[in-house]
Amino acid sequence: MLLSYLRKKLRLTGTKYGCGGGGCGACTVMVSRYDPQTKNINHWSVNACLLPVCQLHRAAVTTVEGIGSTKTKLHPVQERIAKAHGSQCGFCTPGMVMSMYTLLRNNPQPTMEDVTEGLAGNLCRCTGYRPIVEGYRTFSAESCGTHLACRFRSFMDLFRAGQPELFSKDDLLSLDPTQDLIFPPELMRLAEVKDQSTQRFCGERMTWINPGSLDELLQLKAVYPQAPLVLGNTNIGCVWAYQGIFHPVIISPTQVPELFKVTQKPEGVCVGAGCSMSVLKSVLERSINDFPPESTHMFRALLQQIKLVGGQQIRNVASHFSTQISIPDGRRRVSIDKDFFLGFAKTILKPDEMVLSVFIPATRPNEIVHAFRHAPRKESALATVNAGMRVWFNENSNVVKEISIYYGGVGATILSAERACQQIVGRPWEEATLSDAYSTLVDEIKLGPSAPGGKVDFRRSLTLSLFFKFNLLVLQYLKEKDVTQGEIPQKMQSAIQPLPKHIQPGYQEFQVGQSAQDPVGRPMMHRTALNQATGEAVYCDDLPQTDGELFLVIVTSSRPHAKITHIDFSEALKLPSVVDVITAKDIPGKRFRTFIGYDEELLAEDEVTCVGQMVCAVVADSKAHAKRGAAAVKISYEDLQDPAFGSCFQEAIEKESFFLPRRKIERGDVEKGLREAEQVYEGEIRIGGQEHFYLETQSFLVIPIGEEKEMKVYLSTQHPAFTQVSETLGIPSNRVSCHVKRLGGAFGGKVTKTAILASITAVAAWKTGRPVRCVLERGEDMLITGGRHPVWGKYKVGFMKNGRITAADFQYYANAGNTADESVLVAEKILLHLDNAYNIPNLRGQSAACKTNLPSNTAFRGFGVPQCMLVIESMIDDVALKLSRLPEEIREINMYKDVSLTHYKMEFDPENLVRCWNECMEKADFRQRRQAIDLFNQQNQFKKRGIAIVPIKYGIGFSEGFLNQAAALVHIYKDGSVLVSHGGTEMGQGIHTKIQQVTSRELNIPASLIHISETSTQCVPNTCSSAASFGTDANGMAVKDACQILYNRLEPIRKKNPKGTWQNWITTAFLEKISLSATGYYRGHDLGMDWEKQEGKPYAYFTYAVGCSEVELDCLTGEYRTLKTDIVVDIGRSINPSIDIGQIEGAFMQGLGLYTMEELKFSPSGVLYTRGPGQYKIPSFCDVPLKFNIYLLAGSSNPHAIYSSKGIGEPTVFLGSCVFFAIKDAVTAARKDADLTGPFQLNSPATPERACLACATHFTKMVRELH
């Protein structure tokens, strides 16, 4: 593939590996081709991970390195994403840059719709997307001053004059298309030569053939009947990457002109079967302009669907029609109708036939066509259900002459609703006709309870809902043609209106009050953002290959609970270039790592306890050879009885399968509080797990030095000291140095499993005596490393009629997986945060980490808090529904208001919590919007709006006190430059940038003199994990200590020469033999929790925040849009507002994913189905709140952390729940229309399926009544 060619052969490492399946956009490059017919140069953004180099004949490829660099000149696209703070970990940034660059090469003044469409194929897990959109908004036509949104923004700018901005738009590089790279003239000359010779590329195991003519294509197809035809490689490439299916011969007809011919006729458009979706989109757009409006219904329906299929990179290469089919003895026309598809990927075409072109007819007079699609995410997701519907009326009549209704996603192939159509043909389009059709559809579209894909009730409900939307569109059409006089009821009209999607400029409010020379408190750009935007930033797998380097691939268990009877790797060792197989027996030191008192095997030796457990590893001279070797390893098992998967938790609970200790905490008298309450309610909620989906997968390079058993370990980890592999190798820690330059995201997922993977890689390097690299593929990473704990929360609450809660009893069960990992600590933190922001006098909580036969779950941003707080907030919602009151009233009544004690007897002052609440209510204009939403819901039956406001009180620091310490090493060189080393790792949270600001303030020097190279155990030993939102708190104080030591040493020099420069002072200090190097240390807070006494001080302080979101929900499909989000956060005095606001936004979007869309799916036997972005959907650009405002609370301080700041990385993940509760609020309004009131259970994530079914529309009831 082009990606490996760029990275390994050309050493252009700016293009990143993110998923290998074209789903994340990290590998985006621009491919340009010259069209000799039109004399135009066409530019396409493409996924390098799916693009074969064999297909690039006559093409020019531009990577991020080719458009600009910090060493020469930046391109404006690179500069603006960096200066707008749109790059945090930076791993996705080169892909974003190249998508935007390609868009601008084709359209120098795009609209904002163009921008978001062009970026839709790119994912980011850090930023929350808002700063990327804002940075690239500066290129759009809307920034010219004439667009309505621009004029509105100008008004708001005047209104907020004097407020500081996160970045200035005044000094940005201007876009000058004349300075872009030219297309190579030699490729133009080559394209003009009509060379139709066949190209044949022979690899080690595969032959790739590019035929030069249609005749040759047909001959090749006859010789190689099993060879797939590949154009965009978006199908075969993904199957190859994720399933390992191999084809010895591939035929790629990209040079066959007949497959790319487009012809427009009065009857319609004929499009070559090889044309990409982007070409088809252009053809349809042109046809809509060229044909009379009444003839364009088919074109419009197809165009609407194409925009939702894949990202721009996929549409640019994917052919619009399957090309697995040919034409030997002449040509024939075949209708694509109900008889065309026989099954999944099977048609009526013969094996030796191939589709040459597809004819798209113009619609006839009195004919209307519409297409519908529902997917788990609004864009770039495979459809759950799609539909195409067409009706043809008699002239000037509403009597149906013909009708077609087709569904996808409700059977093995396309399904034609023939019986429903028969009910309609020959009858007028009116209520009685349609009523019969609905009843027939319910009976005709059958899905069994165990149908592949699940979601049975939802999919059947969608078939009715989509037909209902078609009905309304047809009625609207008939009314416009004056065929019928009846109006569509006003309350129903919104059912056919699209959800809003225009992203408006957000607002960020922060305070800057110090002198202009002081960098602390200013929105400084991430210190390596420009390097990240140019592809110069080095990640672990970007390190150059070393001499003799080997690659390691892990072999994992295929059974959930079994005894290993034999591992046979003889066939693997026979393969060329396979060097060795590493098993547990090869480990020279400890064969396990210990976490919280539990041992976890590095490699399973006798027994496996989940699918995906690591058993052995294959080492070869390349990744491809190591993968082949891993596939050749045969493991024999003897299944053990009764694996517990914990999908419903009952299995583990019944077997008392828990990791100990189980914790309990209580204050007051809960039983008495429940007895004295005027009402008591019991409820529950289930919260699903979440995949970290850091863009950079687990990566390692271990290099044996060859002397005195020394090892260098380069890796991507949050905890360098924990990944020192010395105990695994049986050598002292001083022989192993761990080096972390930066991480491409982590979120808690690069600690425990990272240590195990590093140990396995080190064993391979130890045994072979050669450098060993290991980089997990996306599917491997998701299978092996675990994620956020699914939690089942149960509660019993007592409350008074005035809304005051008197008692609450909680039980939490967390699915820990097959090993303990950090699950017991997660269960403890759940109990420490069970009160959230509420002063409940009688409170009890019990938690358990359930041992199951699924891959072990681990730390994830928030560490159990996002799960436990959703439980108490769901309880608050239920109390409100029981009392027929608004949830925000119940929240406000029960909130901490005065100096209080937590349930573990820690005193705190909630003044800033209350301030955040009041300011959020005011800035969100909550009460007025609540009234507007009520009115909207009264006027609309199938679209509902909801709003929710949610607070958080989040404890900062490690409850294990020793983890709060930190150290630093600061060197001043003779030229005055400063090198800082500290124990924190840079993973996008901006710790190095903040440390640079701390150093600048303490030494009183410009930031340009300060450099931070890496985090290394050679410089700072015994580091603690960069986690718990405490990295800057601890390491910042250590660096401050070192800087103050140095500054005090220089005091006599400054007194002697007060007018001297920094460089003068340093030179003098050196000559006077004053040490210019110092170690700084921060002891940290003495925190801890006594679980026997149920009291303690587990946190240094609390970060407070309140979030408010409004959504619009389509009750017929469960789709929603977040219209507006306002967040007020107390982070004390921000060290860097741009970084802190970026952390707030990114955490919020991660929470939005957790609570509304991200679902991990396992088979009944414990196999993870969701192993990549194709199956697992994280939020994308289309999920950003349309108006996203962040306010940092003014006038706050915090004596417990550096410069009165507060930790912010984790707390606002939970604020994503305000979208969850806004959806629930909208569902409540829908249920009210269905005469359903009172509490109801809405589990997390609130996917479209759950939201739709909870709305209990007429169509949902029809499906359920059939049962």
Image: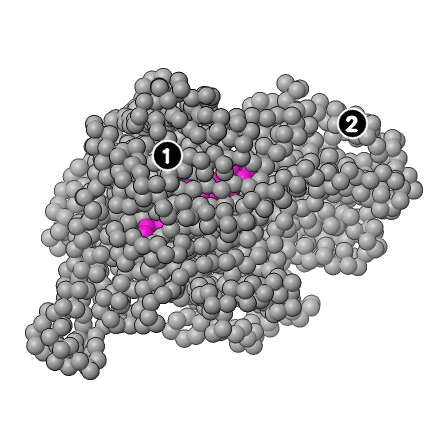
Is mark 2 in CB contact (under 8 Å) with mark 1?
Answer: no
Give the secondary structure at mark 1.
loop
Name the residue at 16% across, 39% down.
Answer: 589
Q: Position of residue 208 (x, y in %)?
A: 52, 52
Judge by depth and name the residue closer to the eye, 171 or 635: 171
The residue under label 2 is which amino acid type?
Ser
Queried whether the magenta region covers residue 1212, the answer comes back as: yes
866 is higher (above) or lower (below) than 303: above
Residue stretch in magenta:
1205-1223
Name the residue at 58% across, 66% down.
Answer: 154
The residue under label 1 is which amino acid type?
Asn
Mark 1 lies on residue: 839
Q: How is the image coloured?
A: one colour
Queried whether the magenta region covers residue 608, the answer comes back as: no
Name the residue at 47% across, 74% down.
Answer: 171
What is the number of the mark on residue 435?
2
Per the picture, the main secondary structure of the magenta-coloured stretch is helix
Which of the 4 image quadrants contains residue 466?
Answer: top right
Graded by Cα atoms within 10 Å as few (under 14), some (14 to 19) or many (20 or more), the crowding at tag 2 reads few
| Quarter that holds the C terminus | top right
